[in-house]
Image: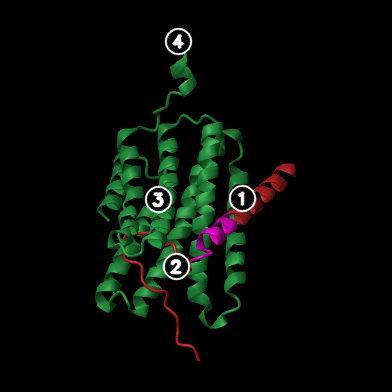
Chain colours: A green, B red
Amino acid sequence: MCAGVCFVACSLRRTSFLKYFFLNLYVILSLFADLIRQGVLRFYGVDSPQYGYAYYYTDCLLTIALFVAVISLASRVFAELQLAKYVRFVAVLLLLGTAGFSYAVVAQSTERLTTVFAVELSQNLYFVGLVLTYLLWGAVLKLQETRTRLVQMVLSLGLYFSAYAGSYALLNLAPRYEVVQYLAPILGCFLPVSWAMTIMRYSEDSRLTPARLVAVPR
Amino acid sequence: MSRKLGAFALALGILVGAMELKTLVTAHNSTVIMANGVSPVPKLPLPPSN
């Protein structure tokens, strides 16, 4: 929670709040979701259906916000190629397609449609975000993007998604070890911390030196 | 027009790839991946069956 507050404070301080509005929106929503979850957790307990509903519905909302954050980064990467409107078109198609697919999966079980739909949509959007982030990272490499903040934020997202997939694999491989169960909550801090460090360390004008230029002998 | 068709094909490709990846990952285990926040993950709430 402190990491999220730190990121939003850094964005405001470096006047980057509106430039990275959807990233900030995700972090702010994440803060509110954590507050709601903690409140329900203390009041009802971890095994209560109330906490389950609060958790899964806020998670669905956060996954949509994270998806929009990934799309906003993609729009910035492709803005110079005049492809931003096509990125938005792809984003809308993906969101509608994922929602439709999720509905088709859970439509059989009508008695628990809303909850399972929220979980299914969240899961499916997570995987769409994962694929989208790797494609975005490929585009950053291909286009030789040099904007340091943009590159580091995309890289953070890639690491975040990969680390979650890794923790999930560990959870399946070694469920006996309690430490594995705490990996996912710890990873929740990674994204705001890495984004806050990026905002603080680099300005909007910072550029990376392409490797080819570094290698040129003088 | 061709760009829109390309964007449509790209969206379909991403969707199919993501769903295949999900099927591969969750094929042998029905537990869920939740990627947001630091709160403990609860069991999936299911209403009582009639």
Of residues A175 and B15, the one nearer the viewer is A175
Disc 1 versus disc 2: nearer the observer: 2
Q: What is the three-letter code of the residue carrying label 4? A: Pro
Name the disc covering residue A163, or none: 3
Res A152 quadrant in image: top left
Q: What is the three-letter code of the residue carrying label 2? A: Thr
User: Is A89 displayed left or right of A140 in the figure?
Assistant: right
- Chain on which label 1 sits: A
- Let me know if residue B22 is in the magenta part: yes
| Callouts 1 and 2 in the same chain | no
The residue that disc 4 covers is A217
Q: Which tag, 4 or 1, sits closer to the chain's start?
A: 1
Mark 1, other Cα within 10 Å: few <14 / some 14–19 / many ≥20: many
The residue that disc 1 covers is A90
Query: Distance from label 4 to label 1 (Cα)?
Result: 42 Å
Mark 3 secondary-structure assignment: helix
Q: How many marks?
A: 4
| Callouts 1 and 3 in the same chain | yes
Q: Which tag, 4 or 3, sits closer to the chain's start?
A: 3
The residue that disc 2 covers is B31
Disc 2 versus disc 4: nearer the observer: 2
Question: Which residue occupies 25% across, 53% down?
Answer: A2
- Let me know if residue A33 is in the magenta part: no
Question: Which residue occupies 31% across, 46% down?
Answer: A193
Q: Position of residue A40 (x, y in %)?
A: 30, 73
Q: What is the three-letter code of the residue carrying label 1? A: Val
Q: Position of residue A60 (x, y in %)?
A: 45, 64
The magenta stretch is B18-28
Query: Distance from label 2 to label 4 (Cα)?
Result: 54 Å
A126 in relation to B4, above or below: below
- Chain on which label 2 sits: B
